[in-house]
Image (spheres, rainbow, N blue to C red):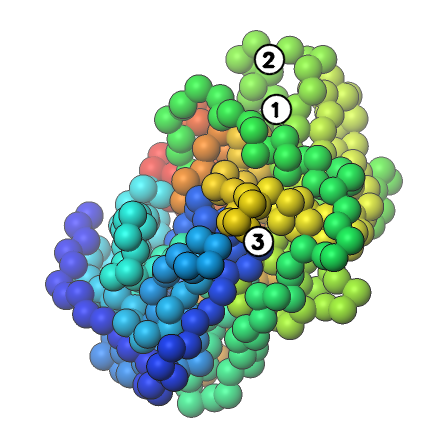
Amino acid sequence: MMIKVQAMTTAVSGTPVRPGKTYEMSVLDHLMAAHHLRIVFYYRSEDMRKLRDSLTEALSYYPPVTGRLERRKEDGNWEVKCNDAGVRVLEAKLDVSLDEWLRSARAEEEIDLTYWEEMPENPYIWSPFYVQMNEFEGGGLAIGLTCTHMQADPTCATLLVKAWSDMHRQSSIVHPPFFHPPGLRGRINPNTDTKSSKYYAAKSKARPPPHAKMSTATLKFSDAAVKKCLSDVHTRCSDATPFDVLSALLWSRVVAAKASMNMDGEAQTALSICIDFRKLMHAALPHGYYGNALHFSSVSSTMAEMEEGGVGFVAEIIHHHLSGLDEEEYWSAIDWVESQKDMEGKFAPPFRMYGPELTCANMEHLPAYDVMFDKDVKPVHVAYHVGNVEGEGLILVLPSPEEGLGRTVSVTLPVEQLEKVLSDNAILRLEPTVLFSGKW
């Protein structure tokens, strides 16, 4: 299977940006600077030529997207110079059909449907956003968006593409961008004595385990399969959510895979959980809040406890942990990041938030399948990848094209562990459709 890039152009805003306009990066934006995002939307048919025009219209609503990063003179922190330098757009063709690609491509090949350049020392001419439009043999299109995590979390990045699709259908933008980075800044009376602030402090000093070759697979769990999981744990955790049971299932199977490789059954094993808190605040942020609104926390157990209690026990401790998170935890994490500034007010260097322990991100809420460039024509599949992940691995619980409780789960683990997880009977009995594993 070959992907041939045929052109690279620059898309600019359809409306000129006011000269001198800048956009400051928030506290959490600086925190996520070590990572980048890749998202791929697959469609049965789209016309690339028409899409270019609507992208220009959509970018008029997003001045920071077409700008360039620079350091502020007063404190050395990042801001965007909204100079409408544009978004890099690539056009590519594949020599396989969409169905063959979805059936046989590997995760590392899917990455090639997106384009990314690491930020140089002087990023003044570097584009923080890239779009790659890929045409399949016989019809079908994959739209790949790549961006620095410093400017957008998965919700923000998804809504950017959704705004593009809204403009393409000549509709109003359902969730317009809300630009207000001061909305998430440290408080006058900070509190850095919480579980979250202590967790962030420990994470900033953590060192990843020895490097291991990683592999990724995508598992599509049907509505019936997720309902079965919920039914199985009902007596132990009656109000469990799909995220609770799927994260519990995958975490427990990863631990079992490690156990077969001589892991100490009494040793503590931790799971880092990532959630979007836009709608969890007392004064909720708009869906379109631009930037990052993610919170990381940790739950732990032992292999022996997990094996004895089963998925129900693990789902219960995850559910209890997430239910116990209150708004003070979110704010204290922000306070802690602020407290790490130097004497001039410059943020500390970023560290990897995804890792080093196994990380599971709840992205069920993403409106990925509402990104419709033609009326009522949904993507057949949407894939998400996070760049610069180190450590034990990453699990993303994502929406599914299927109605109901179906979910798509992206699993990135050391190669040997992933093979064990994919062949685990607890997974196989749910009969997930497996994509991009290169083997299954």
| Tag 1: amino acid | Val
Residue 29 in the image: above or below residue 333:
below
Pointer 1 residue: 255
Mark positioned earlier in the residue sequence (2 or 3):
3
Pointer 2 residue: 263
Residue 251: in sight, yes or no? Answer: no
Mark positioned earlier in the residue sequence (2 or 1):
1
Pinpoint residue 357: horizontal percent, then vertical percent. Answer: 57, 30
- Give yes or no for contact between labels 2 and 1 (Cβ–Cβ under 8 Å): yes
- The mark tally for this picture is 3
Point 68% across, 15% down: residue:
267
Pinpoint residue 149: horizontal percent, then vertical percent. Answer: 46, 54
Q: Residues within 10 Å of mark 1 (few under 14, many from 20)?
A: many
Q: Of residues 252 and 293, which is closer to you in this image?
A: 293
- Give yes or no for contact between labels 2 and 3 (Cβ–Cβ under 8 Å): no
As helix, strand or loop, the secondary structure at mark 3 comes to helix
Q: Residues within 10 Å of mark 3 (few under 14, many from 20)?
A: many
- Give yes or no for contact between labels 1 and 3 (Cβ–Cβ under 8 Å): no
Mark positioned earlier in the residue sequence (1 or 3):
3
Residue 218 in the image: above or below residue 202:
below
Taking the image as shown, residue 15 lies to the left or right of residue 332, namely: left
Which part of the image, by quadrant, shows the C terminus?
top left
Quadrant housing residue 86: bottom left
| Tag 3: amino acid | Leu
| Tag 2: amino acid | Met
Point 57% across, 38% down: residue:
359
Quadrant housing residue 39: bottom left
Point 61% across, 22% down: residue:
256
Q: Distance between the residues labelled 1 and 3?
A: 31 Å
Pinpoint residue 278: horizontal percent, then vertical percent. Answer: 66, 63
As helix, strand or loop, the secondary structure at mark 2 comes to loop
Pointer 3 residue: 28
